[in-house]
Image (cartoon, rainbow, N blue to C red):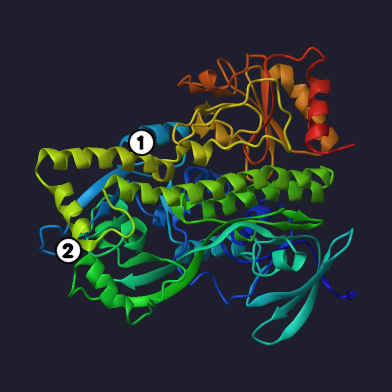
């Protein structure tokens, strides 16, 4: 590598949702970096759109959430998912709704979601989200995001990564020397070059996504975010099309829409910008509706996970590490949370606070979550076939019998009522996708940068629905509203965006000296949040006292990413200072 190589602590390869999030987080942590992206700009496809509560908590911590809420889908327009025969049409089976389920923190789930997080879910398509994230990232790191620049070669050694970057418009090449490299490139370059195998199931189905402009205000349900179409002329919930508004105005007056069609990989049918319009009009039963087609994209459904997330000084994140079916919306959300986990660890090592061993905890923590999320997305995708069965449909069913099933389902007869009741019970199983509250905020790390206690492991809801807050190490810190210095704060607000740790206790005096000693010795930002009567933070609602699972003299140590790293029920027998010293030595992989 030339002596004139551009030197930077972290090189990020990929400027999508994951890479941009990592960039702005590293900036907040004071870590210099360079981001290169081979495309000339951000996504031209709507792609992912649902942002779950945990992702919005990450964005809240780093000053991005409010700008998303200002332009994203209001909760009232994303509070349910429905299954319909069509939007229009005047036939006896047209415009019928099979079922609607509360979704994404709306309807009957709203009080539960609001109780457990300071952040509602949101919805903002990637075609708009990425420019927003890019603006935040470029404001924090001017000149450090280079689009139209491609990684064309790299090697690594014991001290860093040497990369060759090509500026595609000019063909000019330049060298970059980084201490660490993060591949957020969707698995296009770095992973394959390292020989990292993507394990799982590929080529499950062929998906065609159509991005169009159309005025559908007369027919769209004000509360629906996703509508699945099932009609007598189509085949099943996946094959018939799923439709999502894409804004920028939300609700029925959305200007733009995306409709997804699912095909068997060997199905010869081809849909393009010309043939898609009659197909959509027929599906919606709106033969005269005007449509402008922006893009028809083709992609392959897969459920794969990288065999490893780290190779020396190179880390895989986002789609480079895991690719999911879109069900449950786990792709982008998992990617953002990958960046959140990795950023503070890179910062700690680069600042000399932690040993290299801290970085290995990224893989041990996030690989297990990636596996769970890939499996969950596949499970919820396959469950759509169960929904079909619940309505009496099955593959290869003769068209005449299929139509008879439709007629019997909507019939005003006792058997019609029975069919609808059966379907309702089956459709509620899809809460694994649309009410996955525990899956989204209740996940936990079982090994890594944490010190476990001898408490029994938390047993998650097998349906991913019911979230049980806990402060057991490895879990996300439970949310409770506090009053601190006259300001209403969430417990999640106590760890700031600059990479600080926080010690939560009921007795600040007993722990403050120990915290100050640890902060000086390990060079970390460590604050003490004393919560309770007569302390700096008041638990006016009493929720924290019910959730903390420690005594007044006990303490919780919370990482910069708001996961509990360690806890003790009361004052340790060895004293606060020696105990906290040992905890940090273990957490930071310090010899």
Residue 298 horizontal side relative to residue 365, left or right: left
The label number, if any, that marks residue 532 in the structure image? none
Viewer-nearest residue: 267 or 552: 267
Relative to residue 142, is residue 566 depicted above or below? above
* Residue at the outermost top position: 573
Image quarter (top left, top right, bottom left or bottom right) of the C terminus? top right
Residue in view at x 19 percent, y 61 percent: 400
Foreground mark, 1 or 2, reads 2
Residue 249 horizontal side relative to residue 120, left or right: left
Cα separation between marks 1 and 2: 30 Å
Secondary-structure class at tag 1: helix
The answer to whether residue 214 is seen in the rendering is no
How crowded pointer 2 is (Cα within 10 Å; few <14, some 14-19, many 20+) is rated as: many
Kindly identify which residue carries mark 2. Answer: 88
Kindly identify which residue carries mark 1. Answer: 109
Image quarter (top left, top right, bottom left or bottom right) of the N terminus? bottom right
Locate residue 488, reporting x and y percent.
49, 32
Query: For the image shown, how many numbered marks are present on the structure?
Result: 2
Relative to residue 296, is residue 589 depicted above or below? above
Locate residue 125, reporting x and y percent.
44, 61
Earlier residue among tags 1 and 2: 2
Locate residue 175, reporting x and y percent.
80, 75
Residue 460 horizontal side relative to residue 26, left or right: left
Viewer-nearest residue: 573 or 329: 329
Locate residue 340, reporting x and y percent.
63, 48
Relative to residue 68, is residue 287 depicted above or below? below
Viewer-nearest residue: 546 or 505: 546
The image quarter containing residue 495 is top right
């Amino acid at each position: 590598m030339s002596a004139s190589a551009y030197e930077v602590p972290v090189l990020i390869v990929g400027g999508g949702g994951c890479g941009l999030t990592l960039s702005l987080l590293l900036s907040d942590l004071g870590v210099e970096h360079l981001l290169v992206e081979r495309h000339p700009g951000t996504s031209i496809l709507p792609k992912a759109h649902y942002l779950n509560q945990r992702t919005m908590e990450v964005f809240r911590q780093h000053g991005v959430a409010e700008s998303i809420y200002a332009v994203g889908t209001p909760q009232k327009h994303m509070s349910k998912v429905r299954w319909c025969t069509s939007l229009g049409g005047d036939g006896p089976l047209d415009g019928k709704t099979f079922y609607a389920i509360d979704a994404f923190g709306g309807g009957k789930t709203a009080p539960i979601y609001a109780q457990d997080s300071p952040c509602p879910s949101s919805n903002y398509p990637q075609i708009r989200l990425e420019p927003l994230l890019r603006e935040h990232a470029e404001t924090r790191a001017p000149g450090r995001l280079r689009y139209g620049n491609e990684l064309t070669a790299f090697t690594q050694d014991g001290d860093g990564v040497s990369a060759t970057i090509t500026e595609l418009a000019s063909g000019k090449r330049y060298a970059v020397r980084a201490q660490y490299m993060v591949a957020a490139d969707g698995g296009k370059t770095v992973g394959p070059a390292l020989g990292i195998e993507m394990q799982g199931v590929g080529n499950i189905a062929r998906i065609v996504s159509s991005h169009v402009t159309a005025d559908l205000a007369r027919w769209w349900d004000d509360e629906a975010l996703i509508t699945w179409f099932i009609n007598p002329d189509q085949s099943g919930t996946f094959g018939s099309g799923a439709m999502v508004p894409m804004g920028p105005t939300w609700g029925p007056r959305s200007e733009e829409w995306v409709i997804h069609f699912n095909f068997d990989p060997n199905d010869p049918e081809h849909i393009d910008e010309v043939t898609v319009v009659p197909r959509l009009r027929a599906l919606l039963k709106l033969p005269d509706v005007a449509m402008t087609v922006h893009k028809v994209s083709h992609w392959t459904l897969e459920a794969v996970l990288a065999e490893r997330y780290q190779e020396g000084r190179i880390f895989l994140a986002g789609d480079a590490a895991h690719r999911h079916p879109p069900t449950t919306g786990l792709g982008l959300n998992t990617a953002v949370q990958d960046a959140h986990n990795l950023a503070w660890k890179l910062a700690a090592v680069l600042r000399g606070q932690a040993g290299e061993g801290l970085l290995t905890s990224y893989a041990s923590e996030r690989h297990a979550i990636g596996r769970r999320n890939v499996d969950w997305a596949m499970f919820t995708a396959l469950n759509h076939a169960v929904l079909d069965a619940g309505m009496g449909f099955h593959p290869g069913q003769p068209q005449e019998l299929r139509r008879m099933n439709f007629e019997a389902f909507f019939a005003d007869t006792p058997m019609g009522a029975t069919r609808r009741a059966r379907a309702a019970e089956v459709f509620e199983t899809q809460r694994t996708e649309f009410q996955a509250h525990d899956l989204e905020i209740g996940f936990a790390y079982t090994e890594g940068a944490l010190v476990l206690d001898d408490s029994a492991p938390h047993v998650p809801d097998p349906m991913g629905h019911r979230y049980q807050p806990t402060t057991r190490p490895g879990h996300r810190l439970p949310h409770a509203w506090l009053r601190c210095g006259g300001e209403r704060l969430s417990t999640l607000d106590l760890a700031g965006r600059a990479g600080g740790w926080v010690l939560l206790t009921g007795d600040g005096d007993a722990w403050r000296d120990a915290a100050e000693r640890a902060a000086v010795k390990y060079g970390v930002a460590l604050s003490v949040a004393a919560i309770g009567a007569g302390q700096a933070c008041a638990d006016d609602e009493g929720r924290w006292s019910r959730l903390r699972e420690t005594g007044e003299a006990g303490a919780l140590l919370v990482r910069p990413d708001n996961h509990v790293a360690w806890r003790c029920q009361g004052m340790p027998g060895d004293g606060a200072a020696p105990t906290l010293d040992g905890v940090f030595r273990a957490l930071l992989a310090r010899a």
